[in-house]
Image (spheres, rainbow, N blue to C red):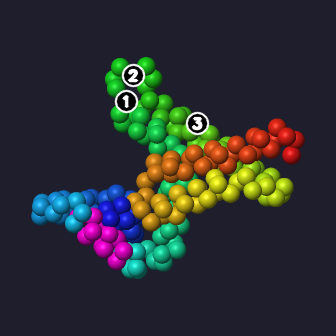
């Protein structure tokens, strides 16, 4: 319920925000139990899904969330930088730009390998890509509805790796 409620907040592109957190805090102060709170937020989230608030159409909103979730891969650097200890052997905050660029470069190579794998497998009419594509499509659809946070695309990263592996196996076979 809560993740759907936050995920359907068009004003904040489906991301965590203080106004929604205040609604949660209010429900907790009312003494409601977890199932009652989740039921409340599920209903409110479905109402938001059906509404036309914010920046326009549902399709534009979903595209914005998709972009927020899948178009970069450096959220780990943010986590490491904000949680770095003073005695860390690597000054992560100091090197965060370079580390972010490295993460995004690796992600770009991974996506390129996925595209190459799909192209080769479709060209040879192989069905090896069906499972990773199905897993990835499920993760995309699920997170388009729920709270959008760049770290949430990591759930689909395993499927991306499976799909990208097809480019390596196809390359080693000469095809």
What range is drawn magenta here?
Answer: 37-47
**Residue contact between numbered discs 2 and 1, judged by CB atoms under 8 Å:** yes
In the image, which disc is placed on residue 88? 2
Quarter of the image for the N terminus: give it.
bottom left
Q: Is residue 98 visible?
A: yes
Q: CA distance from mark 2 to mark 1?
A: 7 Å
Q: SS of the residue at dot 3?
A: helix
Q: What residue is drawn where x is 46% and y is 51%?
A: 152
Q: Would you place residue 50 above or below residue 86 in this image?
A: below
The tag on residue 126 is none
Write the residue at 65% across / 46% down. 162
> Is 99 positioned to the left or the right of 121 in the image?
left
Direction from residue 152 to residue 138 in the image, left or right: right
Which mark identifies residue 84?
1
Query: Element at badge 2?
Result: loop
Residue 155 percent location from the top left of the image = 50, 49
Looking at the image, which residue is at 35% across and 20% down?
Answer: 87
State the SS at label 1.
loop
| Rendering coords of residue 140 (x, y %) | 54, 60
User: Mark 2 and 3 residues: CB-CB less than 8 Å, in contact?
Assistant: no
Local crowd size for mark 1, using a 10 Å CA cut-off: few (<14), some (14–19), many (≥20)? some
Considering only order in the chain, which callout, 3 or 2, is on the residue closer to the N terminus? 2
Whether the magenta-drawn stretch holds residue 10 is answered as: no
Residue 145 lies, with reference to residue 154, above or below; the image says: below
Label 3 sits on residue: 102
């Amino acid at each position: 319920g809560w993740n759907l409620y936050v995920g359907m907040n068009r004003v904040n592109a489906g991301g965590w925000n203080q106004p929604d957190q205040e609604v949660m805090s209010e429900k907790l102060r009312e003494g409601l139990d977890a199932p009652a709170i989740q039921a409340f937020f599920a209903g409110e989230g479905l109402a938001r899904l059906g509404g036309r608030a914010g920046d326009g159409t549902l399709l534009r909103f979903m595209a914005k969330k998709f972009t927020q979730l899948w178009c970069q891969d450096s959220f780990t650097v943010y986590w490491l930088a904000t949680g770095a200890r003073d005695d860390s052997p690597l000054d992560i905050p100091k090197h965060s730009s370079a580390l972010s660029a490295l993460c995004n470069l690796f992600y770009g190579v991974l996506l390129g390998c996925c595209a190459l794998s799909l192209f080769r497998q479709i060209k040879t009419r192989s069905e090896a890509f069906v499972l990773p594509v199905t897993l990835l499509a499920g993760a995309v659809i699920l997170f388009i509805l729920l709270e959008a946070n760049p770290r949430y695309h990591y759930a689909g990263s395993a499927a991306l790796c499976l799909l990208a592996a097809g480019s390596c196996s196809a390359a080693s076979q000469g095809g």
